[in-house]
Structures are given as structure tokens and as C-alpha cells.
Image: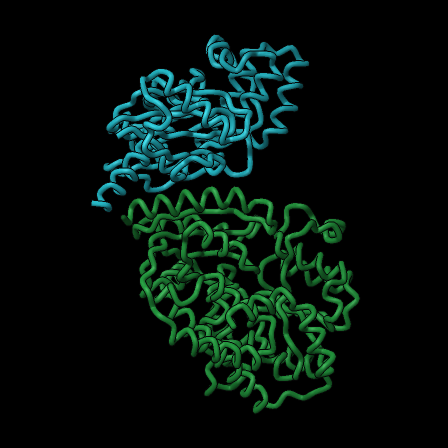
Amino acid sequence: MVVCGIDVGARNVSAVILNDKAILAYCVITSGEEGGSIAQRAIMEALAKTRLQFNDIQYIVTTGCGRNSVPFANRQSTEVVCQAKGAYYLFPTARTVINLGAESSRVVRLTDEGRAISFVKNDKCAAGSGLFLETMSQLLATPLELMGELSLTSDGCEEVSSICAVFAESEVISHIHRGIPKQHILVGVHKVVISKVMELLGTAGINKDVVLTGGVAKNPAIVRELEQRIGSNIIVPEEPQIVGAIGAALGASEALLSSINSRQ
Amino acid sequence: MLEEFENYRKTRHQETRAWKSQTGGKVLGTICCCIPEEIIHATGMLPVRLLSEHEPTLEADLHLPTNLCPYCKSWFDQLLKGKYDYLDGVVIPNVCNVVKATYGFSKYLLELPYVYFVDVPQRISSEGVEFFTNVLLDFKKSLEDFSGKQISDEALRHSIDVYNENRTLLDKVYTLRKTFPSVLSGSQAQSMVISSMLMPKEAHNRLLSRVLADIEKADKVSDKRVNLFISASILDDTDFLRLIEECGGNVIADDMPMGSRYFFGMVNSEDKPLRALAERYLAKIACPRKMLPADRLAFSFGRMEGANINGAIIHSMRACDPHLYEYPLLRQEMEHRGLPVLFFRGEETATELEQQKTDIEAFIEMLRDSVE
């Protein structure tokens, strides 16, 4: 039973191909094209790592903010449900998923059976999202993927406002003009993101184990700051960006099975 | 016939102007559930609820601060823009601070012949009812002076009966919907309540009776949609409920001021009219501004009784302090009772509907997963 899950996110598109619930292949590509064509490209790139053809895929479920833009999908599923399914598949001890994507951050609580039971999402402020980090990376002329490591070398911290992403931006500019070392500012920037996540966790509550997913999970300073604030270890999947797509693929598997059963 | 309620809301300005030209009567704008409309009705004037619009509040922004109740700002903006040019006056109650402030703004910025402040007491108590009865006596005298018509006890009792009939009919609709969600949608039920705040009550009663007879006969088929309860501050159109329906949800009960809170609780027609009105409008309206949290929660959970509810959506308007203060407690109690909750801090704009849609879809999918 070959199925595919595609997470059409604000920044990246990931595709996961499952065969009888085992991951056969996956790929993550940066989006920028229209949802349908980039989803097609993501599937083809994942398929290239297997001996399968597009027609071998029996069911496709899409998730992410662009989930409705893929015309060849059989079904759509929301990020909350897919993140829960994907995290539980990878780590059956997962009870809380923190998903930090490009445009949104959310906390999903899971039952012992791996079902999403509640969730909270960032409000109107962008300060807890990946795009905030991206803006800061441009301001500080530091590549996104190096921000975390550089921040970890700092022995200080320059506070940045957590009230508003726009105010934070002007504060960072003023810190740069005052000659504050970049790594100190980065510590403050990461604290802003985590303070927003802590607000969500305050509402949602924390049940262990905690799994961190989404592109922002690749930032080691975020992981460290979060662990310090929570006071315990968190689990980061090897590929945190494909957790939603795994969940979508699992949803595809369930839907296909249910449709086969109903025909029998 | 069901769409007549929603159509009336959409064409309310036109309809009210037509009423005015046909009857020669006066129209008073009101806000909140705590103004006894019966007294206005007894003078032959038409009380109409002031509603907001999804549009920039450019006129109101000149006078009011940014971080203010979007509903009050919007209806006030509509008045400043001349959309309510048929109004002869407005009646503002003493509820939250913002509403109270709109009395002053209305008095000095609007060129209306009649602007009246109804001093609704803060506490629900026998002293409060006594005080409110006297407030309503002054209100009655003021309306008599303005309308040029004396209000007899008999006329007031008649108005109470008309309004009680409306409450009974709306309650029947809500009870039917709670038990058999397939008979009408949450947004249709809400449009009945909102139109009741706008339409002449006798006409609303007639229309409601006809529709009720139809829906009582309708097939009561099983409904696979997820059943939701909605707790909200001001939602003065049906957009939000329609959004929930588009996402596969079914709002089958609510505690909204633009929903069941408006018609809950009868006026005792056996008691002295003003005292009976004071009693109902002070003690039976579950507004967080004057009702203690335990009683408010009891009202919300009471509205759920008999309904098979899968989850709750709490929608509080930005800057609506009385509702926002209550939200953590309400959420905690709902979750304690095993009811999953989705919370929105909303605006009076249509721009955020897309983001809300994403969250509602996720909530409904999550609930469906747990139901199946």
C-alpha cells in the first residue's frame, strides 16, 4: 500500500512516501511556486529515490497552509492532526508537539493513543515564527542556518522586545548601531521566539515527552533555550520538517484502508 | 422563509426607513441586552439594535482611541457616517466602561434629539432591583415626554406579552435545533435572534411562528457534522457561524448576547410591570459585567443541557474586558468537563476570517478524529 503525504508550508514543501506505514523516501524543497506544481516536484524528487512511479501512489493527502492548492490530492488534512500523527509515529512517547514553522507556531497536546486533543496557535504577532528569525537573519547579515550556532558562542544577552515583531526589528537595528556584538543580539532574538512559545505552552500545558518539529527546530539555540525554559529535554526528530508530511501520509494510509474495507 | 430573517438584517436600514414612512413612528437605537425594549415598544416607537459593519472606522477613529471595543467603535462610526440617518435617538446603558463612554460621545457628537443613559446597577440583588425599578420609572417618563404618549400599565403589560411571546418562540427554535441539529443551522438560528432586535416585534412573532411550524414538521435526519457550543461576546452578524458551518461544524447551542442570552428568561407578567422588567433585565441576563462567574458558568452550561456537544469555541472580541477576564475560568471549567476548547480573540473585521478558518478546520478535524 503505497501512499504519499505532502506538507505545503509557507516556506518549504515536504513529501513523504510510505509503503505499509514504513517510510520509503522523502524530500524537502523550498517553495516559491504555485502549490500544485511544487507539490508535484516534491513527489517526483522523493520518487526518484525509489523504484516507484507516480502512478504507483494509491492515495495522497496534503497538509500545510497550501494544502488546498494541490489538485491531484485525494484529501486534505490540517496541520494539527498531521503533526500529532507524525510525531507519535516517530516517538510513541510524545504527548506534546511544538511545531515552529515559517509563519505559524503551535502547540498540540496528544492523548496516550496519539490523537490530537487540544491545540493553541500563535495569535496575530509574528514574533514567534520562523519568518521573524529570517528577518533577523537579514538584519544581522547572518545566514539563517548559522544563527543558532553563533548565538550559542555568546556569553551575554542583549534584550529584545517580545511585544511586537516590528518593534523588535527597530530595537535590533538600534543594538547594531550601538555596536553590540552580534551573538549577544542573537541570544535576545532567540529569547523572543521562545517567550512566544512559552505563552502558548502556558495555555496548552506541557505533558512529556515534548517533540519539537518544523524548520525552526533545526536551530540549536532555540532547542537549548526551550529546554532551559521547560526544564527538561525535548526530542528533535532527525528531519523536523517532514513530521507534518509523515502525518499526512499516515492519514492517507488510514483513508485508503478504510476505503478498501468499505468496498469489501 | 428562513432567509427572510437574514435578509432583514442585511436590508435593515431600508426596512426601518420604510416602517418609519408608513407609520410616522420614531426609531430609537439601542445596544446591549439590558435595556427593557418593552418600554420603548409601549410608546409605539421602534427599538433597533445598533450593529457594526466590516469596514474601516475612519470617522470614529477621529474621536475614539485605537485600542477600544471594535463593536462600539464600528456602530458609532456608522452613526457618524450617517448610515443611521433615520434614528430619532439612542439609548445607552451603563454596562462596561466603553459603552458608558459612548453615551458622552453620542450626546456631544451626534445631532440626535434624544440620547438617554439607562443606569443599570452593578449588582444583582434585591436592592439592585429596587434601584433599577426607579431608573426604569425615570426612563419611562423620559420616553413619554419624548414620544408625547403616556404609557399605561395596560400598554406596558401588552408589550411584555409581545416580547415574552417572542422569547418563547425563539426558545422553541433553539430547543429544536439543540435536539435535532438537522432542522436548521446555527447561523439560521442566530439570524432569527438578530432580526428580532431589528424588526417590529409583532411582525417577527408572526414570521417566527410560521417558520417554527415548518421546521417542526421537517425531517429530523441524523447529522454527521461535529456539534459545537459557542460562547462569545459580541458577534452581531452570522459570518462567524457560517464560517464554522463551512468548515463542517454545527453550532447547536450558545450563550451569546446576540444569541440565547437575548431571549433567555421571561418577564413575570403577573408582577408590577416596571418591577418585573427590572427583575428580568437585571437578574436573568447572564452578562459578565454584572453576573458573578459561578452564575455565568451555570448559564453557559445550562444552555448545553440536552445537547450532544463535541467541543466549544470561545470567541471574545478584542478589548472586551468583561468577557476576556472570564475566559480562563470558562476554558478551565469546560476542559475539566472534558470539552475541548478553541479560543479566538476577534476583531470586527472580515480580514481575519481566513486565519480563523484554518484553526476551525483543525479543531473540527481533531474532534472528528476523536468522535470516530
Residue at image coords 46%, 32%: A105
The residue sitting at 57% across, 32% down in the picture is A163
Quadrant assignment, res A166:
top right
Query: In front here: A30 or A38?
Result: A38
Q: Nearer the viewer, residue B89 or B179?
A: B179
Q: How is the image coloured?
A: by chain
Q: Quick one: quadrant of the C terminus of chain A?
A: top left
Residue B136 vs residue B198, the one in the foreground: B198
In the rendered view, would you say A76 is above or below B230? above
Is residue B171 shown left or right of residue B235? left
Number of marks: 0
Q: Is B50 situated left or right of B158 in this image?
A: right
For residue A129, say whether it is visible. no
Q: Give the image location of residue B175, x and y in percent.
A: 38, 70
Q: Is residue A20 above or below residue B153?
A: above
Q: How far across and down, in percent of the image, does residue B72 sit? A: 64, 57
Rendering coords of residue B326 (x, y %): 46, 52
Residue B281 location in percent, x, y?
51, 72
Which residue is at a point 54% across and 47% down the rendered structure image? B353
Hey, which residue is sitting farthest right in the picture? Answer: B111
| Chain letter of the cyan region | A
Is A232 left or right of B257, judged from the image as shown? left
Chain B display color: green
Front residue (pair B247, B353): B247
Q: Is residue B274 visible?
A: yes
